[in-house]
Amino acid sequence: MSSKAESKFVYVTYIRTTAERLWSALTSTEFGQKYWLGARPEADWKKGGAWRLAFPDGRIADSGEIVDFEPAKRLAIRWRNEWLPEAKEEGWSLCTMEIEPAAGENVKLTVTHAIERENSRLIGAVSGGWPQILSNLKSLLETGTAILPPKY
Amino acid sequence: MDDDDAVFRALAEASRRRLLDLLQARNGRTLVELCRGLGMTRQAVAKHAAILGEANLVTFLRLGREKLHFINPAPINAIAERWIGKFDRARIGALSELKRNLEGEEHV
């Protein structure tokens, strides 16, 4: 356990693609809604830009701000839940997506999501979704088709 | 690397599955905490953690001098998608929920 109170997960997946293609998949609303299980990531895709995740009916699931935007390397979002009251009251978390070269024709994608409190409801809620979203993203980039149908 | 053989080999050992259980219960543990939880030596736990790391089932983050261990469900999820994803996921979810309720485990 780290010395400060924190909830965090670190998910890693290897994808057979290029850093540039993965970056455009992570920073495109059109492409994003193909693997976000039906939700739609909307943003002003630049550092300091507003970011949000919208359900198909228009409700906002999460919102925040892009705090780091290094093309083909690193995207970080200051992130707050908007629709689960007990997660929203926890305030701001930080979600970081890092792209690194890997063996063969693969790139390594590391998604870290953390908030400074123990037993966070927000981290609990998003930690189940990320593996599915990453699976979808991987199969979309490698085969052109997402495995999981929209959930929302 | 996402390699099914490495994942199954890593999972084919009770201590390594318990190590994952410990991380599932609380993520981001140090080697010392894992030694305590597993009742094993530092060397033994480090070896198990390395095998889980090679299979991408555990990822590591450095925090000062400490190395923190995080469970990485992406490879297990990929295996689940391969055989379960094509079937009715919701129905399978309902079945495991029924099992949890009947067996009296805390509902998540």
Image (cartoon, coloured by chain):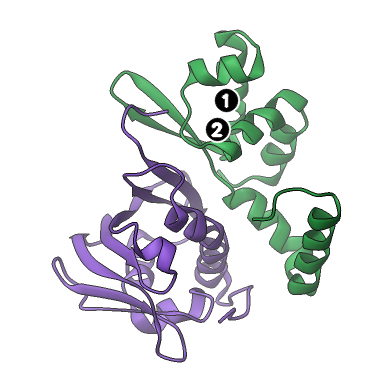
Q: In the rendered view, does B68 fall on the left or right side of A50?
A: right
Q: State the image coordinates of residue A60 (x, y, percent, origin top left).
A: 37, 80
Task: List the residue tagged with mark 1.
Answer: B49
Q: Measure the alpha-carbon separation of dots 1 and 2.
A: 6 Å
Q: Residues within 10 Å of mark 2 (few under 14, many from 20)?
A: many
Which lettered chain is shown in purple? A
Res A42 → quadrant: bottom left
Q: In the image, are marks 1 and 2 on the same chain?
A: yes
Can residue A151 be seen here? The reply is yes
Which lettered chain is shown in green? B
Residue A9 against residue A54 in the figure, above or below: above
Q: Which residue is rendered at x = 55% and y = 76% of the image? A: A144
Q: State the image coordinates of residue B74 (x, y, percent, origin top left).
A: 57, 52
Can residue A16 be seen here? The reply is no
Q: State the image coordinates of residue B56 (x, y, percent, origin top left).
A: 56, 40
Which amino acid type is marked by label 2? Answer: Gly
Q: In the rendered view, does A38 fall on the left or right side of A87?
A: right
Q: Quadrant of the N terminus of chain B?
A: top right
Q: Residues within 10 Å of mark 1 (few under 14, many from 20)?
A: many
Q: Which residue is rendered at x = 50% and y = 51% of the image? A: A13
Q: State the image coordinates of residue A72 (x, y, percent, origin top left).
A: 28, 60
Q: Quadrant of the C terminus of chain B?
A: bottom right
User: Mark 1 belongs to which subunit?
Assistant: B
Res A33 → quadrant: bottom left
Residue A49 against residue A103 in the figure, above or below: below
Q: Secondary structure at mark 1?
A: helix
Which amino acid type is marked by label 1? Answer: Ala
Q: Secondary structure at mark 2?
A: helix
Disc 1 + disc 2, Cβ < 8 Å? yes
Task: List the residue tagged with mark 2.
Answer: B53
Asked whether A36 or B39 is in front, the reply is B39
User: Mark 2 belongs to which subunit?
Assistant: B
